[in-house]
Image: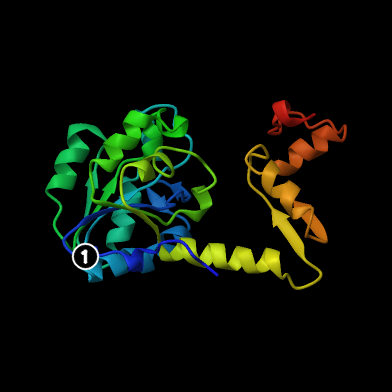
């Protein structure tokens, strides 16, 4: 049972609603290769638009080194989203500062604004208080619909919630309900498949799954760290040395 406050519990008419989405999608030559994460956010976006909100979207994309690392710009994502919905989609070339403030201030109900990559600022991943306040200052309500990033205590996921009325989006609700059912009453045999590059983010998840899963399959970049811990030589493969013990 999902007992958290939902976006549908809030009065959003005439309000600016800032939504943390997970638009960390593969991009090549300025084109989206897989828009699954974008389309997954549409129920929340469309609900807000249908109920008279001005919608501000924020997300990270990749691991940029600085604001000049434009291969990680969310501009292509904004262009793609504009092809998926009927509402006007605007893009702000920053996620904080005057550019973001002016773009948010001029946004009208029924319009969408996508902010530039939150990770263009190193403060994002440090859950910096000032960055959290800067993001919160753009809107009246915060909605978290980024289940894939919910485990990270970042300014755009955790910090901002300290300064705005907050709720979960429909994708967040769906994922939590599905995961809760799978863990509480799994169909046997229960096999968990984990992937991704970083194992350090998932150690707690693995420890909990060991209590309920019949088998755990490790793939992706995580697998190389496990293989290294077992004594295999892996040349230049990605390994998180700090977690080998």
Q: Is residue 212 visible?
A: yes
Could you tell me which residue is drawn at 36 percent across and 40 percent down? 117
Quadrant (top left, top right, bottom left, bottom right) of the C terminus: top right
Q: Position of residue 204 (x, y in %)?
A: 68, 44
Q: Which residue is mark 1?
A: 87
Q: Is the residue 86 above or below the residue 97 in the image?
A: below
Q: How many marks?
A: 1
Side of 173 where 48 appears, left or right: left
In the foreground, 233 or 110: 110
In the foreground, 44 or 220: 44
Could you tell me which residue is drawn at 37 percent across and 32 percent down? 120
Q: Position of residue 208 (x, y in %)?
A: 73, 51
Identify the image quadrant of residue 211.
Answer: bottom right
Q: For numbered disc 1, what is the local secondary structure?
A: loop
Identify the image quadrant of residue 190.
Answer: bottom right
Could you tell me which residue is drawn at 72 percent across and 27 percent down? 241
Q: Is residue 219 visible?
A: no
Q: Is the residue 47 above or below the residue 104 in the image?
A: below
Q: Position of residue 170 (x, y in %)?
A: 42, 66
Could you tell me which residue is drawn at 21 percent across and 65 percent down? 87
Q: Position of residue 226 (x, y in %)?
A: 79, 39
In the foreground, 126 or 228: 126
Side of 215 where 149 appears, left or right: left
Quadrant (top left, top right, bottom left, bottom right) of the N terminus: bottom right
Q: Is the residue 43 above or below the residue 151 in the image?
A: below
């Amino acid at each position: 049972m999902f007992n958290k406050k939902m976006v549908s519990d809030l009065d959003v008419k005439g309000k600016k609603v800032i939504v943390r989405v997970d638009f960390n999608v593969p991009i090549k030559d300025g084109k989206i290769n897989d828009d699954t994460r974008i389309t997954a956010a549409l129920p929340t976006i469309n609900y807000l638009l249908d109920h008279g909100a001005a919608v501000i979207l924020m997300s990270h994309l990749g691991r940029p080194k600085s604001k000049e690392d434009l291969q990680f710009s969310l501009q292509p994502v904004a262009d793609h989203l504009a092809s998926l919905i009927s509402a006007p989609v605007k893009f702000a070339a920053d996620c904080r500062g005057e550019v973001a403030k002016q773009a948010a201030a001029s946004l009208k109900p029924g319009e969408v604004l996508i902010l530039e990559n939150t990770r263009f600022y190193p403060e994002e991943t440090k859950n910096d208080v000032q960055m959290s306040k800067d993001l919160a200052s753009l809107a009246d309500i915060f909605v978290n619909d980024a289940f894939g990033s919910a485990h990270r205590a970042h300014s755009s996921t955790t910090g901002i919630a300290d300064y705005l009325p907050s709720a979960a989006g429909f994708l967040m609700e769906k994922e939590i309900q599905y995961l809760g059912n799978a863990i509480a009453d799994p169909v046997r045999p229960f096999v968990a498949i984990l992937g991704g590059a970083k194992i350090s983010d998932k150690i707690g998840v693995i420890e909990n799954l060991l209590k309920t899963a019949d088998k755990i399959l490790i793939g992706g970049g995580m697998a190389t760290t496990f293989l290294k811990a077992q004594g295999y030589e892996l040349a230049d493969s990605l390994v998180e040395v700090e977690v080998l013990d």
